Image (cartoon, rainbow, N blue to C red):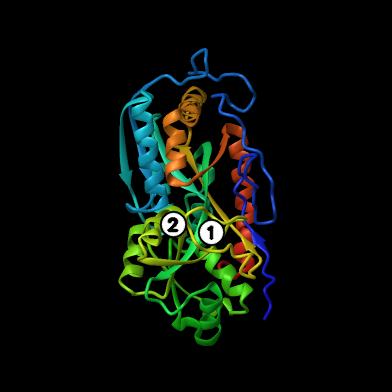
Amino acid sequence: MSRTAHRTIASGRTAAITALSITVLALTACGGTGDDGSGTPGAGATGDGAAEPIARLQLMAPADPGGGWDQTARAMAATFEEEGLADSVQVTNVGGAGGTVGLAELVNERSEEFLMVMGLVMVGAIETNQSQATLDDTTPIARLTAEDEIVVVPAESPYETIDDLVADMQENGAAVSIAGGSAGGTDHILAALIAQAGDVPVEDLNYVAYAGGGESLAALLGNQVNAGISGVGEYAEQVKAGELRALAVSGAERIDEIDAPTLTEAGLDIELTNWRGIVGPPELSEEARQRLIDLVAALHESGAWATQLENNGWADTYLSGDEFEAFLAEEETRVLAVLEDIGLVQ
């Protein structure tokens, strides 16, 4: 059996963590100086690079509660308020279609104190959902985090290893169901890469897409699906509690407190890491854009955010302003190529 489906997705980890890309792209995260990528403080920054407080910040998670975008939005909201960067933060959930429903709402947003969480999932979902709204319709602010994916099964599952799951997929095809996030997102891409590496025809992959991590978790715990794929943080507590069994993780290295090999260790030549970032509404003034860049820079530099990163197991992949915008353009090209390669888009 061939185990040579080698695909990597960009995560741009910091110096301590190797960056992974669909075609092996190494990116160095820029420092949190609250500037516009030129090395000088932008408009709206104070002399030490800190952002001016915002009275009422709106923050959208374009997914249902319980998933990685929702977790990120609420961690950001708590940090903004704890650090005095915003007097109040309103978090809203707008789920559906890999974040493209929320993206369509953002396109019509005209507030200059509005941010939306997004990430690699949305890049793929725009293609698979043929979304009219694209990332070109947003104002890129910053990339913040990256997180490995995890493949899990219910605790009573007969699958003890990732090989067991792949063998059943080979034998029974679409009878084996795998839960994950929206179609075309990181979870779906990983499921397709596992199928491809295991010589399972992509058309035999039975991927069940859910709008949020809470829904896919319920399906797993209710034994409605055979396996699940998501960010480590979404399933970690259930794995530790013995309610789910981890078969493999998708990064370059094993994860502390998760007793599972990497996919590469297990014989599947796959590495994939899911990044998350922040964008603003379109057509922001340069002053408003810089103020949001400075605001997120101040969040990134804060002790409260460092605690959030540690508690959630997120890698710091901060990249700001123009550099983040360039990264997004590269990701759109790379993700489209891999989606075409594994048959998710024509």
Q: Residue at x 62, y 28 (%)?
A: 37
- Label 2, label 1: how far apart the Cα atoms are: 10 Å
In depth, the one of 273 and 207 nearer the eye is 273
| Mark 1 lies on residue | 127
Residue 273 appears left or right of 282: right
Q: Residues within 10 Å of mark 2 (few under 14, many from 20)?
A: many
| Mark 2 lies on residue | 98
Mark 1: which amino acid? Glu
Per the image, label 2 sits on a secondary structure element best described as helix
Mark 2: which amino acid? Gly
Q: Quadrant of the N terminus?
A: bottom right
Q: Given the current orientation, which residue lies at the most extreme top position?
A: 47
**In the rendered image, is residue 197 in sight?**
yes
Q: Nearer the viewer, mark 2 or mark 1?
A: 2
Examine the rendered structure and indicate whether residue 138 appears above or below residue 111: below
Per the image, label 1 sits on a secondary structure element best described as helix
Q: Residue at x 41, y 31 (%)?
A: 304
Residue 210 appears left or right of 147: left
In x, y percent, where is residue 329? Answer: 62, 45
In depth, the one of 257 and 54 nearer the eye is 257
State which quadrant residue 158 falls in. Answer: bottom left
In x, y percent, where is residue 266? Answer: 61, 69
Instruction: Decide which of tag 2 and tag 1 comes sooner along the chain.
Output: 2
Examine the rendered structure and indicate whether residue 146 appears above or below residue 323: below
In x, y percent, where is residue 252? Answer: 62, 55
Q: Quadrant of the C terminus?
A: bottom right
Q: Residue at x 50, y 65 (%)?
A: 188
Q: Given the current orientation, which residue lies at the most extreme bottom position?
A: 171
**In the rendered image, is residue 185 in sight?**
no
State which quadrant residue 35 falls in. Answer: top right
Examine the rendered structure and indicate whether residue 171 appears above or below residue 311: below
In x, y percent, where is residue 256? Answer: 51, 53
